[in-house]
Image (tube, rainbow, N blue to C red):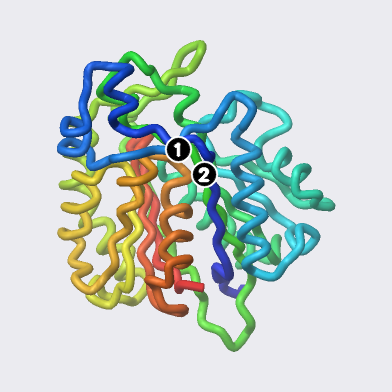
């Protein structure tokens, strides 16, 4: 068995930007109310002619270009999404077709906000098992399409976008670049975050999610570091699911990553569910805020009250 590593990332967001003032004209809210409670200022919103697989394909193409690869070099496509309206072809197959891939394995994962870190672990396991040599792992969601735009407690949160990572096998002489995953869930509290109904609508019990995230997740995140053989103080960056700035900041503080850059893309992008971690990481790398080879904690959490995290080495 060999390890795997992330060799490049890419991200994509729709052109339309929705500000807090725009929202204040739609529902009973204000810029002060939104920023004080969730820290979000703007979010990107996809149009009706921009399906999830298009967002995903744009991000995937950018990741492949950054890696210096072609679509033909990929033999596994994993797409984490919870906003796929059509069941078949799945999102991964649609992305593969858009990118002109030849014969990759194609799978979708629906673990909502922790979908990308679940998908990244799955790609790592596939490479280690020898069933894949190079994977394109994408988190993509169109949350605006499932938002209740009359509910000011949830519509102010959501945004659309996609982030992608290229994962490949390490050389025999290289240390693995993706650490062991720690994942799990709290099934009896799955009702706290829901996407249900016809048409499907996003709803959550905000206080329950906040209490769970800020109290239960920091020790789990520290265990992720232990499994990777690094201390929180050694982390160069922490990229949590971009749910809410009032969750991100206290959780990051409790982890103890005192020397790390903390991703705060939620301010500009809102909650993009499975897209949030790869998109935030891609932006940090694009801005040169993390050195190549530095340890980065990725930690997704949310829907199903599920979580998954791993430490990776920055490409």
Cα distance, mark 2 to mark 1?
6 Å
Element under disc 1 = strand
Q: Where's the N terminus, which quadrant? A: bottom right
Other-residue count near label 2 (Cα within 10 Å), few / some / many at <14 / 14–19 / ≥20: many
Q: Examine the image and state in which quarter residue 255 appears.
A: bottom left
Q: Looking at the picture, does residue 76 appear above or below residue 34?
A: below
Residue 227 coordinates in the image, percent (x, y): 35, 69
Q: Examine the image and state in which quarter residue 136 appears.
A: bottom right
Q: Looking at the picture, does residue 212 appear above or below residue 68?
A: above
Q: Which residue is mark 2?
A: 13
Q: Looking at the picture, does residue 295 appear above or below residue 182?
A: below
Q: Are marks 2 and 1 in contact (CB under 8 Å)?
A: yes
Element under disc 2 = loop
Residue at (73, 60) in percent of width and height? 74
Q: Examine the image and state in which quarter residue 152 appears.
A: top left
Residue 196 in sight here: yes
56 displayed left or right of 270? right
Residue 236 coordinates in the image, percent (x, y): 32, 73
Residue at (52, 76) in percent of width and height? 176
Q: Nearer the viewer, residue 96 or 217?
A: 96
Residue at (80, 52) in percent of width and height? 101
Residue at (22, 22) in percent of width and height? 29
Q: How many marks?
A: 2
Q: Which residue is mark 1?
A: 44
293 displayed left or right of 266? right
Residue 188 in sight here: no
Residue 120 coordinates in the image, percent (x, y): 52, 56
Q: Most extreme residue toward the right, as rendered?
A: 102
């Amino acid at each position: 068995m060999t390890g795997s590593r992330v060799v490049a990332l890419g991200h994509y967001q729709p052109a339309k930007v929705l500000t807090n003032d725009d929202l204040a004209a739609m529902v009973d809210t204000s810029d002060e109310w939104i920023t004080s409670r969730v820290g979000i200022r703007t979010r990107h919103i996809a149009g009706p002619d921009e399906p999830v697989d298009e967002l995903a394909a744009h991000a995937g193409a950018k990741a492949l270009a950054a890696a210096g690869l072609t679509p033909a070099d990929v033999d596994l496509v994993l797409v984490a999404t919870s906003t796929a309206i059509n069941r078949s072809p799945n999102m991964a197959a649609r992305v593969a077709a858009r990118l002109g891939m030849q014969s990759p394995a194609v799978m979708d994962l629906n673990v909502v906000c922790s979908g990308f870190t679940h998908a990244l672990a799955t790609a790592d396991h596939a490479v280690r098992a020898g069933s894949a040599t190079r994977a394109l792992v994408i988190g993509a969601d169109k949350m605006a399409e499932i938002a209740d735009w009359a509910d000011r407690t949830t519509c102010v949160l959501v945004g659309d976008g996609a982030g992608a990572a290229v994962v490949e096998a390490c050389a025999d002489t290289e240390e693995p670049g993706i650490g062991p995953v720690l994942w799990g869930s709290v099934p009896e509290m799955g009702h706290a975050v829901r996407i249900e109904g016809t048409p499907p609508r996003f709803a959550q019990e905000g206080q329950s999610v906040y209490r769970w995230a800020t109290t239960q997740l920091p020790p789990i995140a520290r265990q992720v570091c232990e499994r990777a053989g690094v201390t929180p103080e050694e982390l160069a960056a922490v990229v949590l699911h971009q749910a809410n700035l009032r969750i991100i900041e206290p959780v990051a503080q409790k982890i103890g990553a005192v020397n790390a850059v903390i991703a705060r893309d939620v301010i500009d992008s809102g909650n993009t569910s499975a897209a949030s971690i790869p998109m935030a990481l891609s932006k940090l790398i694009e801005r040169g805020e993390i050195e190549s080879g530095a340890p980065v904690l990725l930690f997704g959490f949310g829907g199903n009250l599920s979580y998954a995290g791993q430490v990776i080495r920055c490409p």
